[in-house]
């Protein structure tokens, strides 16, 4: 993790088990999930949105959209054939809306 701006939100040195500061170079990860989350929550809203978008994009960066589409094509074809053959279990829009109202409370 690159050096972070040590603004008013910086937590200070990490304290080890013996009560002494621990160099971040001796840690596998310099910040815990909770610390990073707290840092992020203290960012201005526009920066939180940019960070959230960046994290979201990086979460599926390994997935190629063409691969995903290709993987779904056989399933889509199977479902279409079931509908055409009359063997698919379907429900009306009214049933779906009623289910959603029940779930939403």
Image (tube, grey):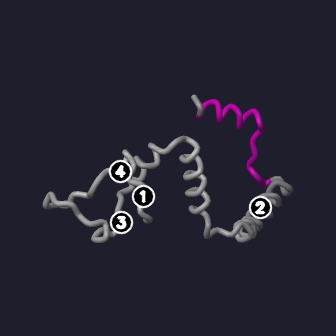
Q: In terms of secondary structure, where does tag 3 sit? A: loop
Per the image, the residue denoted by label 1 is: 4
> In the image, is residue 92 part of the stretch drawn in magenta?
yes
For label 3, the crowd category at 10 Å Cα-Cα, with few meaning under 14, some 14 to 19 and many 20 or more, is few
Q: Which mark is residue 68?
A: none
> Horizontal placement of 50 versus 4: left or right?
right
Q: Nearer the viewer, mark 2 or mark 3?
A: 3
Q: Residue at position x 41%, y 63% from top?
A: 3
- Which numbered marker is on residue 76? 2
Mark identifier at residue 29: 3
Nearer-the-camera pick, 47 or 86? 47
Q: CA distance from mark 1 to mark 2?
A: 47 Å
User: Marks 4 and 3, Cα distance to the nearest angstrom?
Assistant: 16 Å
Asked if disc 4 and disc 1 are in contact, CB closer than 8 Å, the reply is yes
Label 1 with label 2: CB-CB less than 8 Å: no
Instruction: Give the Cα separation between the discs numbered 4 and 1.
Output: 8 Å
Of the residues under marks 1 and 2, which one precedes in the sequence?
1
Q: Badge 4 local density, few (<14 within 10 Å), some, or many (20+)? A: few
Which label's residue is closer to the chain start, 4 or 3? 4
- Separation of marks 1 and 3 at Cα, in angstroms: 14 Å
The residue to which callout 4 is attached is: 10
Front disc: 1 or 2: 1
Q: Which sits earlier in the primary sequence, circle 4 or circle 2?
A: 4
């Amino acid at each position: 993790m690159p050096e972070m701006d040590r603004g008013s939100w910086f937590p200070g040195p990490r304290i080890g088990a013996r009560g002494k500061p621990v160099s971040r170079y001796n840690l596998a990860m310099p910040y815990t999930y909770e610390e990073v989350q707290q840092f992020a929550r203290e960012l201005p809203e526009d920066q939180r949105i940019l960070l959230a978008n960046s994290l979201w994009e990086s979460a599926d960066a390994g997935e190629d959209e063409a691969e995903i589409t290709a993987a779904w094509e056989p399933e889509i074809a199977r479902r279409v054939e079931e509908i055409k053959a009359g063997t698919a279990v379907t429900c009306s829009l009214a049933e779906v809306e009623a289910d959603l109202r029940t779930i939403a409370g």
